[in-house]
Amino acid sequence: MSGEYPRGMCELFEDFNRGDKNCLNEVVVDAGTQDQTAKHGGWWRMTTSADTDACAIIGERCWEVDEGHPLILETRLVVDDASSAVIAVGFGDDEGETVAILFEDEAGTLESTPADGFAFMVEGTTDETWQAVGVDTDVDKTQVALTLGADLADAVTQTLRLEANPNTSGTVKFFIDGELVSTRTNWFDSSIVYCPSVSCDWRTGAINLDIDYLYVAAPRS
């Protein structure tokens, strides 16, 4: 075998069936909690029950779309109270983020914690429809309702998947339950090194967000 580098994929796969988390940083704000549950196969539970609570799990900052594309993120999750949940799933630029919130919607205005990132987001108190969101060099994109996909709903398990490519100044394909629901162009700066993240916080009632797995993959550069 010849070649300057190994072939294949760079991958992160955490299915939460053991005590340690594969290179994931746990961030908890105030009385929020997160830990492994006893659900079959291992699931991760984030619980928030007060206005200032928030939780996030964040991977290492080592994923650059320019160097390995498509960059893929996929997770499977379920929440017990969709109308109270604020959830974001995607990429940001800070693996040590302390506020435990990737994206959220405050009174109709998108608020992003990272300077660069892109994600699924839902603000259940406003609309249980998933949104495509992004921020590029501290400039927020206009969020796009993913109406072709199923809304977040109580006790309904969903699979979310992002596929990012550097073409057209950063293209992201959004999939819900295996169906392509949106393709966004000019959505991110592909030269940024990103970290995967799942975050949740509280609005009007206590929520439990359960995550089956977090998968990230890209070809080796």
Image (cartoon, rainbow, N blue to C red):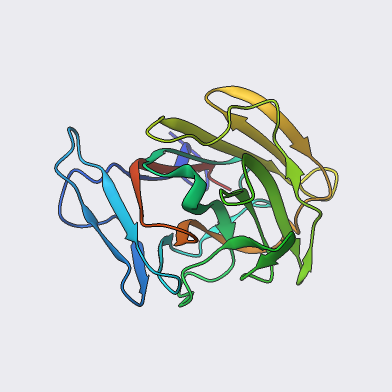
* 75 sits to left or right of 172: left
User: Which residue is rendered at x = 76% and y = 59% of the image?
Assistant: 189
Front-lying residue, 83 or 152: 83
Q: Quadrant of residue 214?
A: top left
Front-lying residue, 51 or 209: 51
Please state the horizontal and vertical placement of residue 108, each as a whole percent of the image.
74, 59
Give the mark count: 0
Q: Name the residue furthest top.
A: 179
User: Which residue is rendered at x = 69% and y = 45% of the image?
Assistant: 132
Instruction: Classify 132 as above or below 101.
Output: above
Front-lying residue, 203 or 117: 203
Please state the horizontal and vertical placement of residue 16, each as a whole percent of the image.
24, 46
**Quarter of the image containing the N terminus?**
top left
Instruction: Classify 159 as above or below 172.
Output: above
Instruction: Classify 142 as above or below 31.
Output: above
Please state the horizontal and vertical placement of residue 167, each as a whole percent of the image.
80, 43
User: Which residue is rendered at x = 80% and y = 57% of the image?
Assistant: 141
User: Which residue is rendered at x = 73% and y = 32% of the image?
Assistant: 182
Please state the horizontal and vertical placement of residue 44, each as a whole percent of the image.
28, 49
* 179 sits to left or right of 147: left
Front-lying residue, 221 or 160: 160
Q: Quadrant of residue 174?
A: top right
